[in-house]
Amino acid sequence: MTAAPQPPAASPSALEEAKAAEAAEAAEEEAARPEAPEDDEDEEEALPHSEAVDVFQEGLAMVVQDPLLCDLPIQVTLEEVNSQIALEYGQAMTVRVCKMDGEVMPVVVVQNATVLDLKKAIQRYVQLRQEREGGIQHISWSYVWRTYHLISAGEKLTEDRKKLRDYGIRNRDEVSFIKKLRQK
């Protein structure tokens, strides 16, 4: 009986950075807790919330410098970190969504994702980009999906429950975002 293969060990710097990020997160959580009355002997100086957030951001910036995570933006979310790690271990794939204006959106989904999962990942990608650029505006996604098709290799991705691999979509494949033609 053979043991399941273990993922490769993280580099020492990555472990140190992860520990720093955990410590910063713990400091932020500690700062967010309401203060309880303390004994004079046990009195500890608590960090103000703004300082705890600064410590957390510094720790996160150190983690993002790891070669595995260097492609992520500075204002990274936990979801993006987890997606990048899943990509590294082959548990996820990047689907390049090409818009009609030539913009390419690299969207990360799990290996066994459905068309609906891809649509949700596109929505999340656009939402995060808008938040980072400061141009937050409301997008009616029901209108978008009624008006546009996702197409891969000439085939429309019409069934939300169908898996991407059933359409032949693999890691780094391109999916086009095309406006539907009017029916007369």
Image (cartoon, rainbow, N blue to C red):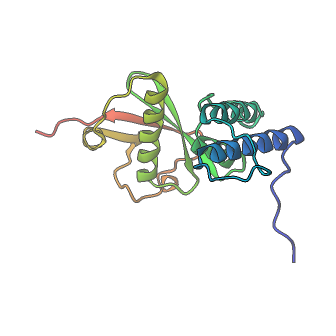
Q: Quadrant of residue 71?
A: top right
Residue at 42% x, 51% y: name it.
Answer: 115
Where does the image place residue 97, in percent across and percent down from the top left? Answer: 47, 35
Where does the image place residue 172, in percent across and percent down from the top left? Answer: 59, 39
Left or right: 3, with 89 as reference point: right
Residue at 71% x, 30% y: name it.
Answer: 58
Image vertical order of residue 100 relative to residue 119, above or below? above
Where does the image place residue 91, in percent across and percent down from the top left? Answer: 65, 53
Instruction: Work out whether residue 81 or residue 117 is closer to the camera in this orientation and state it.
Output: 81
Instruction: Work out whether residue 163 or residue 55 is closer to the camera in this orientation and state it.
Output: 55
Instruction: Work out whether residue 118 or residue 163 is closer to the camera in this orientation and state it.
Output: 118
Q: Is residue 145 visible?
A: yes
Quadrant of image for the C terminus = top left
Where does the image place residue 29, in percent across and percent down from the top left? Answer: 63, 47
Image vertical order of residue 76 relative to residue 30, above or below? above
Q: Residue furthest bottom?
A: 1
